[in-house]
Image (cartoon, rainbow, N blue to C red):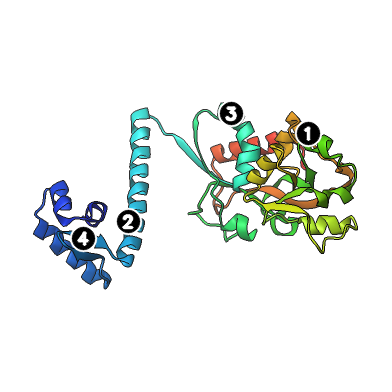
Amino acid sequence: MFEAAARASSFQSAAEELNLTPSAVSHQIRLLEDILGVRLFDRVGRGVTLTPEGAEYARAVRQSIRRLRAATSDIRARGKAGAHIEVVRIEMPPSFAHCWLLPRLHGLLAALPEVDIRVNAQGSHLQGDRIPLQLSADAPADLQIVYGDRDIWEDRAQLLLSEVFQPYCAPAVLQRHGIDAPEKLPMRMLVSTAQNVVTWDEWLQLQGIETDHGPLGAIQMDPSHLAIGAAANGVGIVLESSVLVDQQVADGTLVAPFPQLSRPGVSYWVYTPSGSRPRACVEAIRDWFVAAAGPAI
């Protein structure tokens, strides 16, 4: 009732939708406001408008309704299939999903066609803090690709990929500007990402290059896959993870002008956050990720 009134900005319209009287809707809204202890609507003329508290509550209610509809749709689909469908929820950093998983996704789907795979790449507390939570039977995902240091993850997750950081640019940029020495980099547009573990300042200082005045041109782009895309399109030179640019390096859209000057980053790990033994389908997906990554260093 509240959601219908909030959506229509009218008790009258909500009543017609729900086959109730406007007075019944108004009474129930007042009862809800009394329970919550806040006013949800302001009465304006013949209609209503949400108060700030009402707007916040409406967003939460709509999100809950969407989740309920999705859960209902899932259960109905399983019933129509006439068999038990295994659902596996995978969580990973956004740029890892975009740069590493997407080019390989057809292989994952082909290897496990009977599994309903759900990928969440919106980012999470795990990727942000790089600190694992306590194992839980009600974990937010069945499998997580996490990003962090060896001393945090080595005893609780399986190593997937280790990275190094170095400059990358489009071949045309390298040729056009004759970038044959690191000292020439500050004269070009440098593309950076805020959360990278190696920054341009750190990398340039390691090469003995003065950075007090900064580069002549610089742009920050987040997340990493945007910065990588900008570099591949000739915008500038990006300092990025070897894991995230492997597809562009393989197809020749990015090159590394100074591969001997790479710096170590951290690693990607496969983590199962549940406190119970993973289901066979979860183990199968974990094994696929490890095989697709190749030998870990």
In the drawing, does residue 69 fall left or right of residue 118? Answer: left
Amino acid identity at mark 2: Val
Sequence order check, earlier mark of 2 and 4: 4
Name the residue that disc number 4 marks.
Answer: 48
Distance CA(mark 3)–CA(mark 4): 50 Å
Q: Residues within 10 Å of mark 3 (few under 14, many from 20)?
A: few
For the residue labelled by badge 1, is the local secondary structure a helix, a strand or a loop? Answer: helix
Question: Mark 3 or 2, which is nearer the eye?
Answer: 2
For disc 1, the marked residue is: 172
Label 1–label 2 contact, CB within 8 A: no
Left or right, residue 30 beside residue 79: left
Q: Position of residue 151 (x, y in %)?
A: 74, 59
- Dot 4 amino acid type: Val
Mark 2 or 4, which is nearer the eye? 4
Distance from Cα at disc 3 to Cα at disc 2: 36 Å
What is the CA distance from the residue labelled 1 to the residue labelled 2?
51 Å
